[in-house]
Image (tube, rainbow, N blue to C red):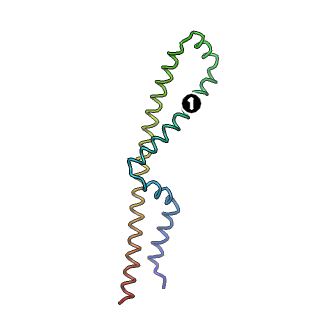
């Protein structure tokens, strides 16, 4: 005979696996510090690409002004401003990446704990049934 409580437990576990199960397993296989560091490294490269893209768009938009600026031969001042802008942008962007990674790790860790709790209760249910059958 089918135990309705077990069916409910199994369907709850299946729903948890289908929603975010792949991300939970992948993220929770890392330690928290390793996961955050990996996300910050990925953020560094993606932030650099985004900053370069924005810089190219600004060059295209302000072409006439930049020609006049470069005619005055202020290359070092321009390079200094770009580097300061890059440093500020990357500091803010990497901070946001780290905060998002910490929050995501906490969320998935809590979901994983809940999943394991349901899985253990299902295992206990099967164990109690086996004990009853032996008797």
x 47%, y 73%: residue: 8
x 38%, y 70%: residue: 120
Position in image of residue 19 (x %, y %): 52, 60
Disc 1 packing (10 Å; few <14; some 14–19; many ≥20): few
x 47%, y 56%: residue: 26
Q: In which quadrant will I find the C terminus?
A: bottom left
The answer to whether 24 is drawn above or below residue 41 in the figure is below
Position in image of residue 39 (x %, y %): 46, 44
Secondary structure under badge 1?
Answer: helix
Position in image of residue 52 (x %, y %): 56, 30
The answer to whether 132 is drawn above or below residue 52 in the figure is below
x 48%, y 75%: residue: 7
Q: Which residue is mark 1?
A: 52
Q: State how many labels appear.
A: 1
The answer to whether 13 is drawn above or below residue 91 in the figure is below
Position in image of residue 13 (x %, y %): 47, 67
């Amino acid at each position: 005979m089918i135990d309705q409580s077990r069916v409910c437990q199994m369907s709850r576990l299946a729903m948890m696996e289908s929603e975010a199960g792949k991300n939970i397993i992948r993220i929770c296989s890392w330690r928290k510090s390793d996961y955050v560091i990996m996300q910050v490294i990925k953020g560094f490269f993606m932030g650099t690409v985004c900053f370069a893209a924005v810089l190219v768009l600004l060059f295209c938009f302000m072409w006439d002004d930049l020609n006049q600026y470069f005619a005055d031969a202020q290359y070092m001042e321009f390079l200094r401003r770009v580097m300061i802008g890059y440093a500020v942008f990357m500091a803010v962007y990497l901070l946001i990446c780290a905060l998002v990674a910490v929050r995501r790790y906490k969320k998935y860790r809590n979901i994983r704990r809940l999943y394991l709790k349901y899985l253990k209760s299902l295992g206990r249910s099967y164990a109690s049934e086996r004990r009853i059958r032996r008797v």
